[in-house]
Amino acid sequence: MSADRDARPDTIVAIGTPPGRGGIGIVRVSGARSAAIAQAVAGRVPAPRIATHATFRDAAGAPLDAGLLLFFAAPHSYTGEDVLELQAHGSPAALRLLVARCVELGARIAEPGEFTRRAFLNGRLDLAQAEGVADLIEAATSTAARAAARSLTGAFSRAIDTLVEALIELRMITEASLDFPDEDIAFVRAADAAARVARLADDVDAITRRAASGARLRDGLTVVLAGRPNVGKSSLLNRLAQDDVAIVTDVPGTTRDTVERPIEVGGLPVTVIDTAGLRQTDDAVERIGIARTWQAIARADAIVLLVDARMHDDEVAADERALLERLPAGVPRIVVHNKSDLAGVVVRIDARPDARHVWLSALTGDGVALLEDALRAIAGVDAAAEDTFLARERHLVALRAAGVHLRAAAGHLAAAVPPLELFAEELRLAQGELSTITGAFTADDLLGVIFSRFCIGK
């Protein structure tokens, strides 16, 4: 961690509970003036970690509210500083008065994420744990919440630290060997450096897969339902959402615009977008809807192309081929053969070179679970996901870069005359990439970006 980072010793204050009315509202204060503010507002500084009932008063001594007073002495607090919590009633007006009173007494309004940033700067959390705080608050599913909790409690950081420790040990061996140029190659080979690098690369790849799965849990999947008119796109949306989200009729072209609905599929947050049927039309409004369908397809993470299961195989093949050829290359797609109940076919899932194919009935729900399985497979998310970390894109970038450096190091070591200086440099670069994840080496401007996205009061 750079030594010149601003420790921000001034005292900060913010409302720590969500906006709106509630039974309880919390005003949180952190910094050297916390005890003095407690004395001025409540007439006492309670014993650390002991909830004390108090009346909160303004400068003239008039009551503002009554509630619980909690004081956490440094360094045994969330931020590592003296922290005061005023647990009052959840009136937005009363909470604003308490904040104003704290500002009168020398505090300033906290910036977004500033409490957690101080926790990081004071060594109470590493950077991955700090990001886990925000991810836990924003988790859209129970599976994502559990994954965020694993990051918050340090599981992700411990996995990274294990890799870094192994890298440091290997670097020590390599650097020591460079001091003895007559024996350097033999020294490194005797230490089994090649096997160590291979194990490290495998371990980085394994953690990258877990992190990628967690990133998908965090960010979710945008799925577009596409196809000809009247193939059951709106019915499938309603079935997935378990609600009458979209209008369903037998009239082709009923859906004129995109309809979005967030759902959960086995712990995976999914935004499903129903779209206008794709066909040639002279209807000006329907043409606008079809244009929006293609816009939605362009930004999709996965495309579910619906066809009518009652069509003959050659008709289905021609219909699929015409639409599949227009879909963006590289975007995963699932072909759903809907209305299996009317076609008299058995629900099933089949992997083909062009796409996964699923036979189901949106009307009865039979086979919809197979579609959900296919979506989880596309996302790379195991339904259990018990060892997943709720990672961010920057974590994945760092892990992948570390893997590249380790493979380059292995390549240097495999040369007839290994260039140990280059081998050592690749190890150093790999360690640097991994260290950015926990914040051991992280630029201040990156910290500003990370914590600015937190909510105020956290």
Image (cartoon, rainbow, N blue to C red):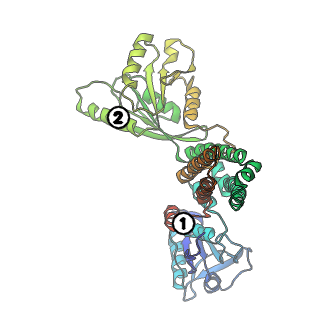
> Is 275 left, or right, of 195 in this rendering?
left
Mark 2 neighbour density, 10 Å: few (under 14) some (14–19) many (20 or more): some
Quadrant where the N terminus sits is: bottom right
Query: Please, what is the three-letter code of the amino acid marked with disc 2?
Result: Trp
> Is 443 left, or right, of 234 in this rendering?
right
Closest to the observer: 285 or 61?
Answer: 285
Please say if 122 is above or below 212.
Answer: below
Mark 1 neighbour density, 10 Å: few (under 14) some (14–19) many (20 or more): many
Asked which quadrant contains residue 179, the reply is bottom right
Badge 2 is on which residue? Answer: 294
> Is 42 left, or right, of 251 in this rendering?
right
Badge 1 is on which residue? Answer: 113
Q: Earlier in the sequence, mark 1 or mark 2?
A: 1
Please say if 388 is above or below 327.
Answer: below
- Residue 260: % across, % down: 43, 40
Does residue 383 appear anywhere in the picture?
yes
Closest to the observer: 261 or 192?
Answer: 192
